[in-house]
Image (tube, rainbow, N blue to C red):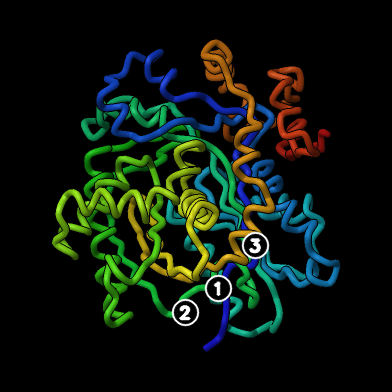
Amino acid sequence: MSIVGIEAINVFAGTSYLDVEKLAEYRKLDMTRFNNLMMKEKTVALPYEDPITFGVNAAKPLIDALSPEEKDRIELVITSTESSFDFAKSMSTYIHHYLGLNRNCRLVELKNACYSGVAGLQMAINFILSQTSPGAKALLIATDISRFMIEDGGDALSQDWSFAEPSNGAGAVAVLISEKPHVFQIDVGANGYYGYEVMDTCRPSADSEAADSDLSLLSYLDCCENSFIEYQKRVKGADYAKTFGYLSFHTPFGGMIKGAHRNLMRKMVQAKPKDIEEDFNRRVIPGLTYCQRVGNIMGATAMLSLASTIDNANLDAPQRIGCFSYGSGCCSEFFSGVARKEGQLRIRALNIREQLDKRYELTMEEYENLLRGSNALKFGTRNVTLDSSFIPQARKAMGKETLFLKEIKEFKRIYEWVS
């Protein structure tokens, strides 16, 4: 069987964040319900940050680590997102340019709500497995930015949608896929996918969202259960409790994952509450660690959870990780792979935790000023020059060269590297 998987993976979660407990108190939310979100922080995209800057900043350390010959073997760049700013032009073209990649390369963009990142991963895996270009590599950039405006009117919109603000984040995960799966070796053919039409979450206009939060939760639980059942059909003997050393979930917020895991442990294993709690802490919490600090980054969240799992797991021995991805609308997939100590050391060398620590913490006043000015950079903006003096502490927060949006001139986005 061919060997394929993740050669390298990196996370970039912006330059600023908000303490979401402070946000919840400021918004006067029900703190009992807020605690069920299991959220700590959320990345907030500043005006000069967008899906391109997040994606390039995530990918650059991976690309810089390649030799010129290895870099030239990247023959497919996929952007997975629901935050694109053009109906035709793929964001992968900008990312390809700013990373200086070979022009012998396919450039595409995928959309299917939060499932898009895993859709891109599977597309890249099958490109490598096809052997149409032996030795080639694929670069996946899953990148998203949250929007907090809600469509007015309509009975389907939940009154609880305000709880999305503390949980929705921004950021990108860059994934290099090849025949050298140093970080995560895919179990080829071990996939269970499940999807159908449901109107749980959508973006009916370019700069807004609408959702039925109760329906979304039920759809997530349904897909999690049934995609695993489909996985079992392809992987004989697969056991939810015993097959996987760790579990990695698409994480809208931690409380949803706790509910999904509890549902599967009850139905698949008939486990008791105490055992479910212990199993959650042991196998699932490592994958929530970074999600709790970044928030839901839509198409990138499943990959964020996988990176968090590998970084925080005990990998003294190889561990099989079961992964679940869900995208509203909906499509879902349960798949698996094996992580080893080598991959953990490679991820830890990128200092993801330290990069999260370096972000600038926004005050509530700064955050409110940001929201008030958010309409200045909307979908379809033709010309604008970004204010580089806005929260200057964030522009220097990473302590290294970082890409930012400089201006939009006749729709073309122009970026600059800032040290």
Q: Is residue 385 above or below residue 365?
A: below
Mark 2 Cα shell of 10 Å, populated few (<14), some (14-19), many (≥20): some
Asked if residue 404 lies left or right of residue 13, the reply is right
Tag of residue 188:
2
Residue that numbered label 1 is attached to:
125
Q: Secondary structure at mark 2?
A: strand
Let me know if residue 288 appears in the view: yes
Q: Earlier in the sequence, mark 2 or mark 1?
A: 1
Tag of residue 8:
3
* Residue 75 sits in quarter: bottom right
Q: Position of residue 160 (x, y in %)?
A: 27, 28
User: In the displayed image of the protein, which residue is found farthest to the front?
Assistant: 316
Q: Position of residue 291 (x, y in %)?
A: 46, 42
Q: Position of residue 168 (x, y in %)?
A: 44, 35
The nearer-to-camera label among 2 and 1 is 2
Real-space Cα separation, disc 1 to disc 3, in angstroms: 14 Å
| Residue at (71% x, 80% y) in the render | 135
Tag of residue 373:
none
Q: Secondary structure at mark 3?
A: strand
Tag 1: residue type?
Answer: Ile
Residue closest to the eye, 252 or 247: 247
| Residue at (40% x, 68% y) in the render | 335
Q: Is residue 179 above or below residue 18?
A: below
Tag 2: residue type?
Answer: Val
Q: Secondary structure at mark 1?
A: helix
User: Marks 2 and 1: CB-CB under 8 Å?
Assistant: yes
Asked if residue 19 lies left or right of residue 200, the reply is right
Mark 3 Cα shell of 10 Å, populated few (<14), some (14-19), many (≥20): many
Q: Is residue 38 above or below residue 375?
A: below
Q: Earlier in the sequence, mark 2 or mark 3?
A: 3
Q: Is residue 186 above or below residue 386?
A: below
* Residue 141 sits in quarter: bottom right
